[in-house]
Image (tube, rainbow, N blue to C red):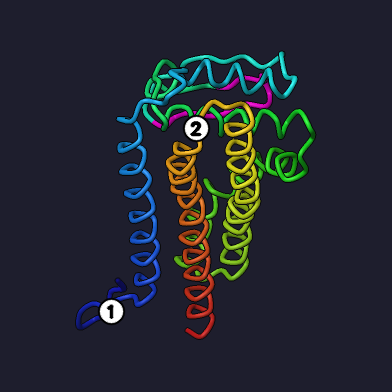
C-alpha cells in the first residue's frame, strides 16, 4: 500500500503476488501429498534409494559418482562439482516407490552431467549471476522506487530477470532427468509395470513444482515492470 494524505491506496499488483503464491502452494501441496502416499508403498524389488542409485549409475556405466545421505526431507540433489548424489533420510535407506523414484531422478542429473547435457551446463554456468540477481534485485528496485531513479528500477528488473532465466533453464533439466529416471527404472526392472504409474505420478508432481516456481517468478517480474511503469507516469 502507498501512503496518501487521506488514507492508503491498495497496490493492485499485489494480486499478481497472491496468484503466484496460490500456484506455488497448490504445486507444493500436491508434491508433498503424492510423495507421502507413495512413501508408504514398498517397492516390489525391496531396493533402498541408495541401492537404486547404485544400480542405475552402474547400468549407465558411471562409477565415479558418490552416493551419500543428507539431512532433511526432500533435500535430495546432485552436485556436479563433487559428483555426489545426496539422498535425504526419507530416500537413502527407504524401500518405498517414492524413495526409488527420487533416487532415480537424482541419478538422471548425474547421467546428464556424464553425457554433457547442454541445458545442465547452461544452468550451472548461470548459477552465480542468478544468485546475485535473486539477492540484489529487490533492494535495488526498492531503492529506485524510493529515490525515483529509473536506472535503479531497470537494474533491479534486469537482475530479477536473471533469476527468472535460471528457473526457465531449470525446466528442461528437471523434466529430462525425470524422463531418464522413468526409462531407467523400467529398463533395469527396479520397478514393475504396475509401479511405474506411481513413479510417473511422483515425478510429475515434483516437476510441476518447478513449473509453479517459474510461473510465480514471471508474475513477480511482471509486477516489477508494472510498478516501474507506474513510477514513470508519476
Image vertical order of residue 99 relative to residue 217, above or below: above
Q: Mark 2 highlights which residue?
A: 192
Left or right relative to 185: residue 47: left
Is label 1 in a helix, a strand or a loop?
Answer: strand
Left or right relative to 79: residue 120: right
> Residue sitting at 65 percent across and 44 percent down?
176
Image quadrant where residue 41 sits: top left
Image vertical order of residue 14 relative to residue 126, above or below: below
Q: Comparing marks 1 and 2, which lies closer to the viewer?
A: 2
Work out which quarter of the rendered image holds the N terminus and state it: bottom left
| Residue 127 location (% of width, % of height) | 65, 40
Q: Mark 1 highlights which residue?
A: 9
- Whole-angstrom CA distance, mark 1 to mark 2, is 59 Å
> Residue sitting at 36 percent across and 38 percent down?
35
Task: Residue at the far left: name it.
Answer: 6
Q: Residues within 10 Å of mark 2 (few under 14, many from 20)?
A: some
> Residue sitting at 56 percent across and 68 percent down?
149
Amino acid at each position: 500500500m502507498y501512503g496518501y494524505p487521506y488514507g492508503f491506496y491498495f497496490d493492485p499488483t499485489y494480486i499478481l503476488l497472491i496468484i503466484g503464491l496460490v500456484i506455488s502452494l497448490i504445486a507444493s501441496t500436491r508434491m508433498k501429498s503424492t510423495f507421502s502416499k507413495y512413501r508408504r508403498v514398498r517397492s516390489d524389488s525391496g531396493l533402498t534409494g541408495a541401492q537404486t542409485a547404485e544400480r542405475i549409475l552402474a547400468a549407465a556405466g558411471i562409477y565415479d559418482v558418490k552416493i551419500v545421505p543428507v539431512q532433511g526431507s526432500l533435500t535430495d540433489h546432485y552436485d556436479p562439482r563433487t559428483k555426489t548424489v545426496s539422498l535425504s533420510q526419507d530416500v537413502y535407506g527407504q524401500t518405498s516407490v517414492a524413495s526409488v523414484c527420487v533416487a532415480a531422478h537424482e541419478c538422471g542429473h548425474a547421467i546428464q552431467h556424464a553425457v554433457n547435457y547442454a541445458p545442465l551446463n547452461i544452468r550451472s554456468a548461470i548459477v552465480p549471476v542468478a544468485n546475485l540477481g535473486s539477492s540484489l534485485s529487490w533492494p535495488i528496485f526498492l531503492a529506485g522506487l524510493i529515490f525515483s531513479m529509473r536506472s535503479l528500477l531497470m537494474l533491479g528488473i534486469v537482475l530479477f530477470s536473471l533469476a527468472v532465466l535460471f528457473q526457465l533453464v531449470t525446466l528442461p533439466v528437471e523434466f529430462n532427468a525425470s524422463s531418464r529416471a522413468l526409462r531407467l527404472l523400467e529398463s533395469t526392472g527396479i520397478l514393475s509395470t504396475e509401479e511405474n504409474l506411481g513413479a510417473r505420478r511422483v515425478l510429475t508432481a515434483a516437476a510441476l513444482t518447478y513449473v509453479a516456481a517459474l510461473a510465480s517468478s514471471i508474475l513477480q517480474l511482471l509486477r516489477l515492470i508494472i510498478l516501474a511503469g507506474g513510477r514513470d507516469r508519476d
